[in-house]
Image (cartoon, grey):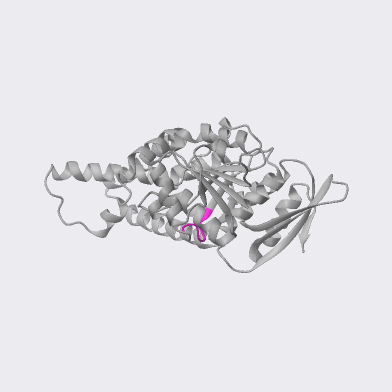
Amino acid sequence: MRVALVGVGLIGGSVGMAARRRLGAHVVGWNRSPAALEIALRRGAIDEAVASIAEIGTADIAIAGVAVDALPDVVRALCEALPDAVVTDVGSTKGALVEAIEHPNFIGGHPLAGAEATGVAHAREDLFEDATWYLTPRDESAGVLYERLARFIAGLGAVPTAIAPGDHDRLMAAVSHLPHVVANLLVAQASDAVGGEMLPATGPSFRDATRVAGANPPLWGQIYAANRAALATQIDDLVRRLGEVRGLLEAGSADLAVWQEAAAQQRRALLEVGLAGGGGAVREIRAAVPNKPGVVAQIALALGRAGINISDMSLAPEADNRTGVIALWVGAADADRAIGLVAGLGHPADAA
């Protein structure tokens, strides 16, 4: 396997390390900083460095790990230079990028992994262990390319999960981008409250709630801008909810305790959903499908929307090359539901 990395920072470098050591891949890297390439070579994140995308040659997997505003140009260049590769990215917003890139070999991606320290010097092989890695296939995505990319990501230790671009951006606005905005505002409000004096001793709640405040300004400025519509919707909803709490305070309402308890229950439910589906027994299900673009993406997205992760998959075309069989491995507890969903899409399915 030959892997191309454009942008060898924390994420790209960690991909390279995991691909080389876990999958035996040959990794070629390019970065605008020659110093970063030297560190990547020294740390074993890449096997060789090139001076441009045109010098990569060939690749099975190509990953753009550059700044959000640079992604469209880099992804297009990779699609043109590497027509046999499946091209993906690691950006944290997907809607605008997927809309901008029409090439069928591109499948958007976003690993939910990272660290406070950035740069390839902090890359590590286990960064993606058990992490969700969102994939946003489009209607015309070829099944063989999606399978190749999903298998690669699973080989890095992550959990490939299909999601529609718009759903991805709404979700990230709520659980990632809005919390960063709120952390920034909490710090600003505390700074105004102390009037320029030294911040007095604080409890862990303030430190925990503001841990991400001011993180990586160039990166986060681009993320806010790229997901402006979904983030604005979340901000408007938060303002509405704050108004409701203010109303409870003004009324001196006993419902404040009820409101607090509701938050505790919602947090427990969210954590249970986040912890479910990791590891455990799996079952294989099989479905007969037509051999045409978009079928695998349709199935993966349907299961992803239902919260069913595909831990592995394989495609086997029939002799007539017009139909084939897709095998999917899902959590044992989700198998019957997955069979029903796949069958509901018009593809007869059963457990193997």
Q: How far across and down, in percent of the image, does residue 345 sit? A: 74, 47
Residue 2 shows in this picture: yes
Q: How far across and down, in percent of the image, does residue 214 sit? A: 30, 44
Verify whether residue 90 appears in magenta: no
What is the quadrant of residue 312 in the picture? bottom right
Furthest residue toward left: 197
Taking the image as shown, residue 339 lies to the left or right of residue 255, namely right
Residue 205 versus residue 246 in the image, above or below:
below
Taking the image as shown, residue 209 lies to the left or right of residue 228, namely left
Split into 4 quadrants, where in the image is the C terminus?
A: bottom right
Taking the image as shown, residue 347 lies to the left or right of residue 250, namely right
Q: Considering depth in this image, is 129 or 32 the residue closer to the camera?
A: 32
Residue 79 versus residue 187 in the image, above or below:
above
Q: Considering depth in this image, is 272 or 132 the residue closer to the camera?
A: 132
Q: Residue at x 33, y 40 (%)?
A: 217
Q: How far across and down, in percent of the image, does residue 104 sit? A: 66, 36
Please tell me whether the stretch drawn in magenta is mainly helix, strand or loop: loop
Q: Considering depth in this image, is 150 or 285 the residue closer to the camera?
A: 150
Q: Residue at x 42, y 35 (%)?
A: 232
Q: Considering depth in this image, is 341 or 295 the residue closer to the camera?
A: 295
* Residues shaded magenta: 127-132
